[in-house]
Image (cartoon, rainbow, N blue to C red):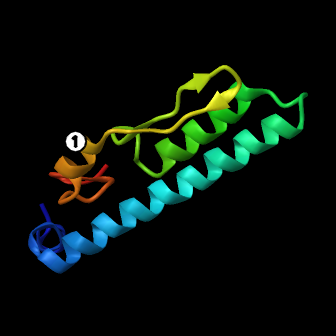
Amino acid sequence: MSNRTARKRKHPQEAEREHHRVEDKLAQLEAQVEARNRQVREHPRCDPPAGQRKLHAWVERHKLTALVELPLVGDQLHRVRHDAAIARDSHHLPGVSRWGCE
């Protein structure tokens, strides 16, 4: 583990900043889910599974797969937070493994 990574994981202010960063990403995801659900309601030709795939790719790109799920219920997406995983992983940097960047 690099010195910089260890500092970020152990320094309380850095850990708090990273936790806020994850919370901001989750808030951005919620806004995207709401926008997609609104679009599906207003435009009957929209394909709900296509929107689910797009948002799932966004979740993977931002390394949030262990923290949220995006099930499709009917034609609406729902965001399911895994609060235990968020609390457990709040002191770890997303995308950084023990040996460096993933």
x and y percent of residue 13 in the render?
A: 19, 79
The quarter holding residue 74 reads: top right
Helix, strand or loop at mark 1: helix
The quarter holding residue 69 reads: top left
* Residue placed under numbered mark 1 in the picture: 84
Give neighbour class at mark 1: few <14, some 14-19, many 20+ (Cα, 10 Å).
Answer: few
x and y percent of residue 70 in the render?
A: 52, 33
When the figure is inspected, residue 66 is found, relative to residue 4, above or below; the finding is above
When the figure is inspected, residue 84 is found, relative to residue 27, above or below; the finding is above
Q: Residue at x 60, y 41 (%)?
A: 55
In the rendered image, the residue lying farthest to the bottom is: 13
When the figure is inspected, residue 93 is found, relative to residue 49, above or below; the finding is below
Q: Residue at x 50, y 58 (%)?
A: 27
x and y percent of residue 76 in the render?
A: 67, 30
Closest to the observer: 56 or 77? Answer: 77
Query: In the figure, is residue 2 to the left or right of 37?
Result: left
When the figure is inspected, residue 19 is found, relative to residue 32, above or below; the finding is below
Q: Residue at x 87, y 39 (%)?
A: 42
Closest to the observer: 85 or 8? Answer: 85
Residue type marked 1: Ala
Query: In the figure, is residue 51 to the left or right of 9?
Result: right
Query: In the figure, is residue 15 to the left or right of 51?
Result: left
Query: In the figure, is residue 97 to the left or right of 40?
Result: left
Locate the N terminus by quadrant.
Answer: bottom left
Closest to the observer: 54 or 47? Answer: 47
Q: Residue at x 55, y 58 (%)?
A: 28
x and y percent of residue 58 in the render?
A: 56, 46
User: How many dots with numbers?
Assistant: 1
